Amino acid sequence: MNKNSKWVRGVMIVLLVAGVISLLGGSYLTLMFTNQTNVPAVTPVVTSTDPGITVDVVSTTVSTTGTTTPNVTVETVPLEDPIYKIFTSADSKFSMDQPKNWSNTDVALFSLSSNFSGQKLLGVKDIEKSGSLFASKYMADKAIKAADIWLDMDTEMTKAGWQGQLLGKYADGYTETAEFSYVKNKETIRLQSKVIVNNTGDKKIAYLINFSANERDYQNGYLGLATHIIGSAKTQ
């Protein structure tokens, strides 16, 4: 082989090596640029909880290797109940939910037998329909039974011309809940009632909570409301 052929072959080899090096360098730069710019987007997650909304605020940290690390900050935003507000007695020993948009009204305190002394706590009424909610506190020198309070209450209702019947009763420790139906002049009212007793100490205490409405309103919108309110009544 002559000198010219050897020289041409050498030049071709040099050009081939330079091309391979250029191709590898371009691929490396493309890979580095892709790792630094194509960071996956992270969408904040919002989940609803009671009594507020918990917001998971997510940010990302990009390491030198191109990976992402989530940073989560949890914030709770309290929500206002659109239906109920909490009633608390002056001594903070009794509380219950009450409808937020009902108006105050005079409390019809039942004049129970001479064994009890009574105190008015709450009286509110639905200005659009027949619903009424009352809460009273009674005290006695001897142990109080829920049945005794309901017996006196029924006696007063009978004196006012109402004829009633007990539809159901549920007892849970010191708390008893009952449902009554009263009829007068072809008008029927439904009554959910709850008695909470505290027979400790020298003075015995009982709380009486009554939710009443005419039969039609009770069956068409009030049943769930009454059940929730009566269930919410509690002592501290």
Image (cartoon, grey):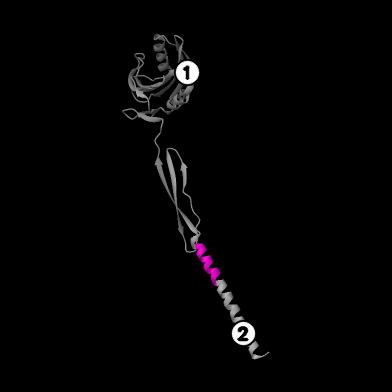
Residue positioned 43% across, 41% down in the render: 53
Helix, strand, or loop for circle 1?
A: helix
- Front-most of 110 and 29? 29
Residue 27 located within the stretch drawn in magenta: yes
Percent coordinates x, y for residue 201 in the rendering: 35, 25
User: How far apart are the two marked residues, 2 and 1, measured between alpha carbons?
Assistant: 106 Å
Residue sitting farthest toward the bottom: 2
Rendering quarter of residue 183: top left
Rendering quarter of residue 175: top left
- Front-most of 6 and 188? 6
Percent coordinates x, y for residue 120 in the rendering: 33, 21
Q: Is residue 11 left or right of residue 130?
A: right
Residue positioned 40% across, 42% down in the render: 77
Residue 30 located within the stretch drawn in magenta: yes
Residue type, numbered disc 1: Arg
Q: Which residue is mark 1?
A: 216
Q: Does residue 50 sit above or below 91 in this rendering?
A: below
Residue sitting farthest toward the left: 90
Residue positioned 39% across, 9% down in the render: 159
Residue type, numbered disc 2: Gly
Q: Which residue is mark 2?
A: 10
